[in-house]
Every structure is written in C-alpha cells, then in structure tokens.
C-alpha cells in the first residue's frame, strides 16, 4: 500500500473511531482522575509492607456516580468535553502511525531485501515504530484533552480558538516541555500496546476475521497488560503539582493490585468499537477506487 493511501485512510479511520466513542473516554478519564484524588487521601495513611492501608476508606469511585456527576454539572455536552483536539488531530496521528509503519517497512525492504522475518516479528517491529510515533504526537493532545475533561469549570469553551489559547498558556508557563507532561508512560504504553495490537490484528485478519471484529478483539487484548501506564499518564497530566513519572508510578503501585485498573471496563467498552470502526474504515479506504489512483499519482 502506497504511503499516501495509508495516511488518508489512517486519518479518516482514526477520527471516526474517536468521534464514535468519546463519551466513554470522558467517563474513563474522570475515573482515572478520581482514583488519583483518592490516592492522595491514602498517602496520609499507614502502610503494611509496600501497600497503603487506611482506617476509614475514602468514598468509593463508582461508574454511575461519575456519569451522573458529569450530566448534572454540564448536561449531555459534558460527555464531549475535550473532543476537539482528538477528532481534529488524532486522526492525523493515526495517519502518521500508519505512515511511519509503512516507512519502516520500506526501509526494511531497502536494508534487508532478502529478509525472512516472521509475520509476528515484522508486526512487532512496525507496531513499535507506530507506537513511538503515537507517543510523540499524542502527548500534547492528551495534555489538552485530559485537562479539559477533568476541569470543573463551567466557562471552559470547546472550540479551536480556546484550545489555541490554552496551548499558548501552557507554553508560556512551562515552555514546550509543558505539552509533553506524561510522555514517559505514554511512550512505554504506546510502543508495547501498539505492537501487541498490530500483531493480534494481523493474526486475526490472517485467520479470516473481518476488519471490524479483528479491530475490536485486538484492541481489547492489548489494553489490559499496560493499562496502569495510562492511569499514570492521566494523573500526571491532570495534576497541578507536576510530580515525576517515578513518584506517581511508585504511589500508584503501592496500592493493592486490584486498584491499579480504575476505568478499565469503560476503556475496553470504548476501545473495542473505536478500533473496530477505525480498522474497518481504514481497510475500506485503502481498497477504494478513488483513493488508489490519487496515491499512485503522487508516488
């Protein structure tokens, strides 16, 4: 598949998948953020071994409590807070992921034209390249999105001008590095989970699964092993004290293992349909009659 086709298909598929599932993303980010606030309470408690214990348990974090709090404070539009950056830009990011994977394959063809790599190894390499590309491009988007989704301000606007102003404020206060808060966990998460997802997707397609079902299953398989990294990223980006990755990771893993995965169920409910839509549209566009001539003409 030519590079332009990968880019166009990746953008449309990525944007459509995000648009279809953003309300679930808002709920999961709120769950992760609330888990961080709860952990701050636990830090005042004694420990047994490496784990926090407490005399009186903080208020439990409930899915429906989060849903009702969003609706009661902001109305139905509250579930779409933070949607502008990912819809406009994460489609571009997914296009860059597919483009970087295509470039990695072309580079491998040039350097090792007679290679005999297994399909699994190839998809691991290309998926890791795509995951690192995603971390570079996604982190600033997640900073803007996460802060919008976790703020309780009623005056925060959901438009391009408002996000441009927020970006300028972050850069003015912290420099460009302020847009890369949470990059370390995002990098580890991206490289590992994208590699696993593309390996699983390739295998499922090889076995005859449809693009939609292969996308659903591969996404749901690749999230749980690395999910705590996503929670840590959210906490880093939502916090105002800018604690380091090591500090937040240490505190996170001092909880009981059952508390390492707040919002995982919602994440899986979102990730499945999102990547099902993404991969379905991507493959449809890659084989479309109007896309191939345009891509071939450029190349």
Image: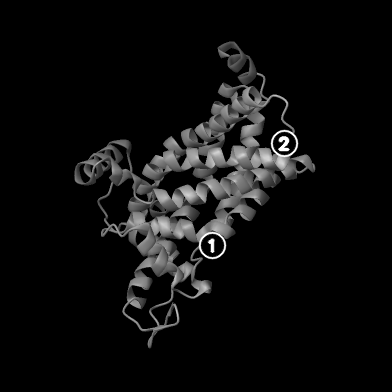
Colouring scheme, one of rainbow, by chain, secondary structure, one colour: one colour
Residue 210 shows in the view: no
Residue 142: image x %, image y %? 40, 47
The quarter holding residue 117 reads: top right
Residue 291 shows in the view: yes
Residue at position x 72%, y 39% in the image: 119
Q: Earlier in the sequence, mark 2 or mark 1?
A: 2
Which residue position holds label 1?
264
In depth, the one of 66 and 90 nearer the eye is 90
Q: Is residue 206 left or right of residue 140?
A: right
Q: CA distance from mark 2 to mark 1?
A: 34 Å
Which residue position holds label 2?
117
Callout 2: few (<14), some (14-19), or many (20+) C-alpha neighbours within 10 Å?
A: few
Residue 136: image x %, image y %? 43, 40
Location of the C terminus by quadrant is: top right
Question: Is 137 rendered above or below residue 28?
Answer: above
Residue at position x 29%, y 44% in the image: 177
Residue 203: image x %, image y %? 73, 44
For label 2, the SS is loop
Callout 1: few (<14), some (14-19), or many (20+) C-alpha neighbours within 10 Å?
A: some
Residue at position x 51%, y 66% in the image: 261
Residue 226 badge = none
């Amino acid at each position: 598949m030519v590079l332009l086709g990968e880019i166009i298909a990746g953008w449309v598929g990525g944007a459509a998948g995000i648009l279809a599932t953003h309300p679930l993303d808002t709920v999961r980010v709120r769950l992760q953020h609330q888990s961080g606030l709860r952990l701050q309470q636990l830090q005042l408690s004694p420990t047994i071994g490496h784990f926090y214990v407490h005399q009186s348990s903080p208020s439990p974090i409930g899915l429906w409590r989060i849903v009702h709090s969003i609706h009661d404070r902001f109305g139905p539009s509250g579930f779409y807070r933070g949607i502008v950056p990912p819809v406009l830009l994460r489609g571009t990011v997914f296009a860059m992921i597919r483009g970087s994977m295509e470039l990695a394959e072309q580079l491998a063809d040039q350097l090792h034209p007679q290679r005999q790599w297994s399909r699994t190894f190839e998809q691991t390499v290309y998926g890791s390249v795509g995951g690192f590309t995603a971390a570079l491009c996604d982190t600033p988007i997640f900073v803007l999105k996460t802060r919008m989704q976790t703020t309780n301000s009623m005056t925060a606007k959901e438009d391009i001008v408002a996000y441009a102003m927020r970006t300028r404020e972050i850069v003015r206060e912290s420099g460009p590095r302020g847009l890369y808060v949470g990059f370390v966990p995002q990098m580890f998460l991206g490289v590992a989970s994208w590699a696993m997802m593309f390996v699983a997707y390739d295998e499922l397609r090889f076995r005859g699964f449809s693009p939609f079902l292969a996308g659903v299953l591969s996404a749901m398989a690749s999230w749980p092993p690395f999910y705590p990294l996503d929670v840590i990223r959210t906490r880093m980006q939502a916090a105002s004290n800018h604690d380091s990755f090591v500090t937040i990771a240490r505190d996170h893993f001092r909880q009981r293992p059952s508390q390492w995965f707040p919002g995982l169920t919602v994440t899986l409910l979102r990730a499945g349909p999102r990547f099902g839509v993404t991969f379905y549209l991507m493959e449809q566009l890659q084989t479309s009659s109007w896309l191939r001539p345009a891509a071939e003409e450029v190349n």
